[in-house]
Image: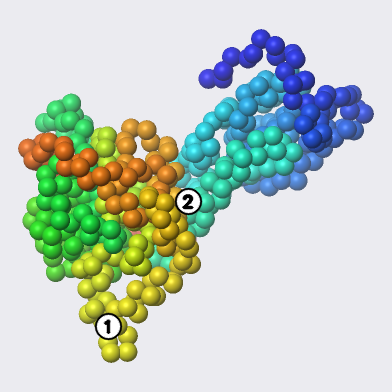
Amino acid sequence: MLPPPPKNIDSLAGQFWNIAAAKNGEPTAAEKQGGTRLHSAYNPSREAAGTIAASALAEKKTAVFYGFALGYQVVECARQFPQKKIILIEPDVSRFYAALSLIDWSDVLKIQQLVIALGCPEDQILHLIDDTSSFGIGKTALDDTVFFDIPQFSAHADAYFTNIRAIIKRNKTKNEINTSTLRKFGRLWCRNTLRNIPRMTEIAALPQTLQENPQKNPGDFPALPFLIFGAGPSLQSVLPHIAELSERAVTVCVETALHALQRAGIEPDFIILTDPQFWAYRHIAGLSAKKSVLITELSAFPAVLRFPCKKIMLCKSQFPVGEWFEEKMDVHPANLGAGGSVASCAWNFAQSFGAKEIFTAGMDFAFPGGQTHIKGSSAEQTWHTVSGRLGGADKFVTEMLCGANVQPGTDYNGNPVLTDSRMKMFAWWFESRLAACHTAKTFTLCPQGLNVPGITPAPLSRLLEKKKILKEKTDFLDAVTSNNPCVPAEKSDDLRKLLETFPQPDFLARYDFLRDYL
């Protein structure tokens, strides 16, 4: 809903602009501060029409305007492309009403897919543009968007629009990485998924919420704190207290941290493994976790689904083959999303199951002390196993340190710490996700890692002073794991027929990119 217009709307324009008549009689304007001309002094409408016609909007779905001055370009966009989605971004509400008072915006206000973002926080703009719509493999809404970024329209709020441009650029970079990953691992993900599909008759789907359990009332469960373990070097500082911490929070670990946790004498409540590569499986190979629930997805390396643990559950597949089978079999697991790292899936899991406080340990996004992983992690053990006289474990550490554009960063205490472009991208995902989520507060118990805005450093005492929740955790785990197999026995023949006739024409029509991998 738009804020109400100010009472002095007729005089608003004079506060910002010097208004004059163009040669064709239309209003034109220049900024009062600096005198920057905003529109043509001869024919503003013709200038705007040329700008819109010269854009690539005919082949795109969305037009985004970084500011709009009097609105001539917006009006022309609405006239030429009334079926497009139009998003207007302006931090100053008064400028919007001033523009309405000078030229006719009626064609704009008739647009069904019109989004007017007035005074919207920078970190929320991305969600208005890059929604959850399906744009095909490796594509997002950003790929189907034209950005009208006319410098004189945004100069009055340069810092605001600079932040938005940076957010959009980082998200585009992330999408390019995801696309490259799809292309690089497409054959592997297809092969793994097709081998794992028959297991849908044995393995349960992770529920989207506790409301899916008919025996339990979600109100029966308090908002339990969660503790997420990464395998960063800083995890070492927490290990002496890990038993006490695990009694006071639901514990979730990424697969790379399992080895270190077990060496410290605990098994986490949940283990998350969503990487399809064999090397991800190697982090848990040879281990068992009889008290833990493993959350994975259909594209995981097949041996992952044989991991000895309390229970294995499937989250929503992030790859088209798995998504297609889930759709056909009417299976709807929890979507843990993707942020480039398994840690992002772990955070999504905690947030989606009602956590109000999420603590992290070993989630460094950096190389504190020049180390890449906690000592004793499965990664380090593998390096020692394959090292030789001419290439010790230090060689692999050096390759990792230098392999992804090492950059300086700052930890939570203001001290310098090394990071790289890949981990900065992971950290940015958390920054943007945390800014958009106001239901959970996130803390780190390890201030040695890269400072991520939105994550607050907290002493161990903040969690250690909480009461023990052993019974509450048991009830919570029982509720989460109560689902039956994804595909019931009576539908097993339908699944078998789908697998035998795959790929079907509708799949290939949607995901032609995968044809060479099937």
Residue 85 in the image: x percent, y percent? 59, 35
Q: Is residue 152 above or below residue 317?
A: above
Of mark 2 and mark 1, the one earlier in the sequence is 2
Between the C-alphas of marks 2 and 1, the distance is 42 Å
Residue 347 visible at all: no
Viewer-nearest of discs 2 and 1: 1
Residue sitting at the far top: 7
Count of residue discs: 2
Q: Which residue is mark 1?
A: 387
Type of amino acid at the residue the image marks with label 2:
Gly
Which quadrant holds residue 62? top right
Which quadrant holds residue 301? bottom left
Residue 354 in the image: x percent, y percent? 25, 35
Q: Give the structural element (helix, strand or loop) at label 1.
A: loop
Quarter of the image where the C terminus is located: bottom left
Type of amino acid at the residue the image marks with label 1:
Ser
Q: Residue at x 43, y 58 (%)?
A: 416
Residue 229 in the image: x percent, y percent? 24, 53
Residue 122 in the image: x percent, y percent? 53, 37
Closest to the observer, 282 or 304: 282
Do the CB atoms of the residues marked 2 and 1 lie less than 8 Å apart?
no
Residue sitting at the far right: 23
Q: Which residue is mark 2?
A: 136
Q: Is residue 49 above or below residue 143?
A: above
Q: Give the structural element (helix, strand or loop) at label 2.
A: loop
Q: Is residue 183 above or below residue 132?
A: below
Q: Residue at x 48, y 54 (%)?
A: 174
**Left or right: where does residue 130 sit relative to residue 468?**
right
Which quadrant holds residue 384? bottom left
